Amino acid sequence: MALPTDNLLALFRSIVDIESVSHHERELADAIETTLRGCAHLEIIRDGDAVMARTDLGRGERVIIAGHLDTVPVDGNLPSTTTGTGDQIIVHGRGTCDMKGGIAVMVWLAQRLAAPNRDITWVFYDCEEIEDTANGLRRLAAGHPDWLEADLAVLMEPTSARIEGGCQGTTRFDITTTGVAAHSARSWLGHNAIHDIADVLERARGFDARQIEVDGLVYREGLNATLISGGLASNVVPPSCTVQINYRFAPDKSGEQALALMTELFEEWTLQLRDLSPGARPGLDQPAAAAFVAAVGGEPRPKYGWTDVARFASLGMPAVNYGPGDAGKAHAIDEQCPLPDLDACVDALERWLSS
């Protein structure tokens, strides 16, 4: 089934209405592949539930424009609905913001930009919303590295149609304190592990979360205890307690440097590492990125949170986040995206790729 491509609103709603929760993107991938295979200017490959399409015009520069097809689970918010009229239309439904508005822009432009001033690789991939090992972009980088070579990557995550450069890094780790179980009526016979975790929490609370300038953008760091568990019963002195800590760090440091900083901060305890994902420097001083900023206009902002721009950065290219929708509405029960955001992204990308 091909997607309707003569009207941006109809295209957007059609994409949203194809449910594509992680691991179930096939129907949407099929529709995008069918739609783009009719374009003589595109070379296309399919890898699982990912689709890549590219021009090969011998231009002096190549850019990647990428977006993930999957969403978090539906919560009674499909099919899509709309409110407003004219230039005030808002589309509501799961995936509108994260990130099918960006996917709609990509399909719309991939069909129309037959002779861009830069060669373009369009990357539609699966399984971004779940565990890293399933990530479709990771799989594509391993299986088709030549398709992911470019001078700049634009990831169409929701940014309200404003450029957000780079992204924070993130690491999560557990700290466990050990006590001795005893009846709470005879607590002197035991040792309370929950009481001991207070020292860990106090250390985290006292951390100096800095604001760090990286390539002209200021990133705020954050260290938070996010989960805690412990105890056996209400009448037992708890023999163990575990707190999970999440450190969001500026892209001035590597993942290894961030982990070393945490190891030093919590030197009295053993850190049980859950995950570690380095951030990405914005790289806005690179020629391809600077040209993109000039075409889009506005003042770039730092990206708070981790996105797949970090994967592109690890492949040796600058990468930015730029797409329709307010990230504050991502995953929300009232997830939504204004149609004017899509129009703004289409206009800006056309200026950049056609001028």
Image: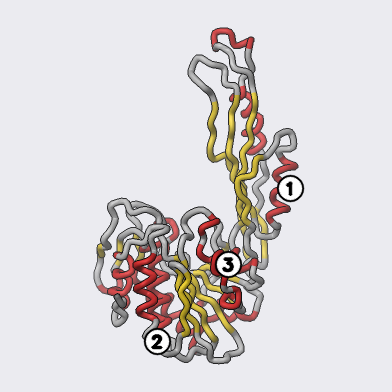
Q: Is residue 150 above or below residue 70?
A: below
User: In this picture, is 314 found above or below 219?
Assistant: below
Q: What label does residue 165 carry, if any?
A: 3
Is 213 placed left or right of 129 in the picture? right
State which tag comes first along the sequence, 2 or 3: 2
Instruction: From this view, report whether residue 166 is shown above or below residue 289.
Output: above
The residue that disc 1 covers is 260
Other-residue count near label 1 (Cα within 10 Å), few / some / many at <14 / 14–19 / ≥20? few
Reading the chain from its start, which is encountered first: label 2 or label 1?
2
Q: How many marks?
A: 3
Residue 160 seen: no
Q: CA distance from mark 2 to mark 3?
A: 32 Å
| Callout 2–callout 3 Cβ contact below 8 Å | no
Kindly identify the residue that appears in the image at 63 percent across and 59 percent down: 279
Q: Is residue 41 left or right of residue 18?
A: right
Q: Which residue is mark 2?
A: 39
Q: From the viewer's side, name the closer residue of 175 and 345.
A: 175
Which amino acid does the dot numbered 3 rest on?
A: Gly
**Mark 1 vs mark 3: in front:** 1
Callout 1: SS: helix
The color scheme shown is secondary structure
Residue kind at label 2, given as amino acid type = Cys
Q: Amino acid at mark 1?
A: Ala
Q: Residue 9, image x and y in percent?
A: 30, 74
**Percent coordinates x, y for residue 161 in the rendering:** 45, 70
